[in-house]
Image (tube, grey):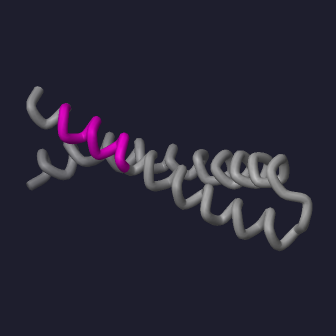
Amino acid sequence: MLAQLLMLLPLAAMTERLWYALPLVVSVSLVYSATRHEQVGAILNNAWRNALWILFFMFLAAMVVQITTWTL
């Protein structure tokens, strides 16, 4: 039981780093949307959609990496 918990410890430490992605996703989405639109409502609406797309692709890439490392 203790050995299983110790194996999960590095995994828990790595998930802490994911919080660094949040300000990056927000800033990239806002800047990208601001270059496409001029009105604040349109910028925020497009930034929200862009942030969801970025998070979706980050999740997809993480799942691909996770699946490929299971076989090692």
- Residue 71 position, x and y percent, is 9, 31
Task: Give the residues in magenta.
Answer: 60-68
Q: Is residue 65 magenta?
A: yes
Location of the C terminus by quadrant is: top left
Query: Among all residues in the image, which is located at the extreme top?
Result: 72
Q: Where 41 sits versus 35, above or below?
A: below
Please name whichever residue, 4 or 31, is drawn nearer the observer in this view of the structure: 31
- Which quadrant of the view contains residue 3? top left
Q: Residue at x 44, y 54 (%)?
A: 56
- Magenta stretch mostly in which secondary structure? helix
Whether residue 36 sits left or right of residue 64 in the image: it is right
- Which quadrant of the view contains residue 47? bottom right
Whether residue 48 sits left or right of residue 64 in the image: it is right
- Which quadrant of the view contains residue 66? top left
Q: Residue at x 39, y 50 (%)?
A: 59
Please name whichever residue, 12 or 44, is drawn nearer the observer in this view of the structure: 44
Q: Is residue 67 magenta?
A: yes
- Residue 12 position, x and y percent, is 36, 50
Q: Residue at x 35, y 47 (%)?
A: 60
Q: How many marks?
A: 0
Location of the N terminus by quadrant is: bottom left
Whether residue 70 sits left or right of residue 32 in the image: it is left
Whether residue 50 sits left or right of residue 16 in the image: it is right
Q: Where 60 sits versus 65, above or below?
A: below
- Residue 32 position, x and y percent, is 75, 47
Please name whichever residue, 15 or 22, is drawn nearer the observer in this view of the structure: 22
- Residue 63 position, x and y percent, is 28, 46
Q: Residue at x 79, y 48 (%)?
A: 31
